[in-house]
């Protein structure tokens, strides 16, 4: 059954610069004067990367949301809390290993929080563009067998609700 979540709102600019190699290690570029801890980013899952970063840089800014001519910054620890809230919501919806979760949204911290929560549950994120037609969303969601759907705003929520039918 497909469930539509409550809506997500804001605009995002990422403060994270990274480079990665998928051989089991990745490195976040340190700002001048910062030092990396040996092995900090040796990981087996993306969830481990997110948790370790939150532990290493709890008060550092991660995501900036444009608000009234300025950016409001979210720290790594604040983002970690949002991931845990999203994880709890997904678990309450019955999302588990191998399940699929749809996201219809532009780039924003909420998208990243839902994706990180999915990674923590070994669930699969099915991303879609806001500009796609509702019939495209319906096809993708039903083909992927999505158990939940997160949307960017009330407009998309309404359009998805009219077109997307539980399978």
Image (spheres, rainbow, N blue to C red):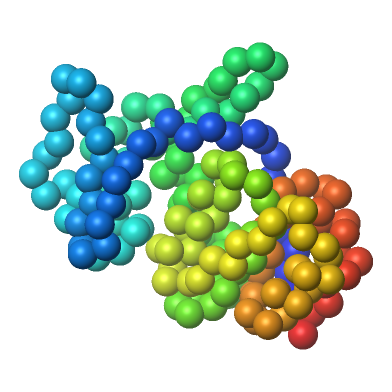
Can you give x and y, in whole percent of width and height, for residue 48 in the image?
29, 56
Determine the residue located farthest toward the right in the rendered image. Answer: 162
* Residue at x 45% of width, y 56% of height: 116
* Residue at x 82% of width, y 63% of height: 133
Can you give x and y, in whole percent of width and height, for residue 125 in the image?
54, 66
The quarter of the rendered structure image containing the N terminus is: bottom right
The answer to whether residue 96 is left or right of residue 77 is right
Determine the residue located farthest toward the left in the rendered image. Answer: 38
Give the total number of marks visible in the rendering. Answer: 0
* Residue at x 57% of width, y 74% of height: 100
Can you give x and y, in whole percent of width and height, for residue 21 in the image?
25, 57
Q: Is residue 79 above or below residue 67?
A: below
Q: Is residue 67 above or below residue 159?
A: above
The answer to whether residue 101 is left or right of residue 56 is right
Occupied quadrant, residue 5:
bottom right
Q: Is residue 2 above or below residue 42?
A: below
Q: Is residue 12 above or below residue 70?
A: below
Determine the residue located farthest toward the top in the rendered image. Answer: 69
Instruction: Examine the rendering and report whether any part of residue 1 can be seen.
Output: no
* Residue at x 78% of width, y 70% of height: 136
The quarter of the rendered structure image containing the C terminus is: bottom right
Can you give x and y, in whole percent of width and height, for residue 10 in the image?
67, 35
Instruction: Examine the rendering and report whether any part of residue 28 can be seen.
Output: yes
In the image, 110 versus 84, the foreground residue is 110
């Amino acid at each position: 059954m497909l469930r539509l979540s409550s809506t997500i709102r804001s605009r995002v600019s990422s403060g994270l610069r990274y480079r990665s190699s998928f051989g089991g290690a990745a490195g976040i570029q340190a700002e001048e004067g910062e030092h990396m801890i040996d092995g900090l980013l040796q990981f087996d899952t993306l969830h481990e990367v997110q948790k370790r970063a939150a532990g290493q840089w709890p008060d550092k800014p991660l995501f900036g949301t444009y608000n009234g001519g300025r950016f409001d910054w979210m720290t790594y620890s604040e983002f970690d809390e949002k991931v845990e809230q999203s994880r709890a919501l997904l678990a309450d919806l019955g999302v588990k290993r191998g399940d699929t979760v749809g996201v219809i949204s532009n780039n924003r911290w909420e998208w990243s929080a839902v994706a990180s929560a999915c990674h923590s549950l070994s669930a699969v994120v099915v991303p879609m563009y806001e500009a796609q037609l509702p019939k495209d969303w319906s096809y993708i969601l039903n083909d992927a067998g999505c158990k939940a759907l997160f949307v960017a705003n009330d407009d998309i929520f309404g359009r998805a609700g009219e077109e997307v039918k539980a399978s």
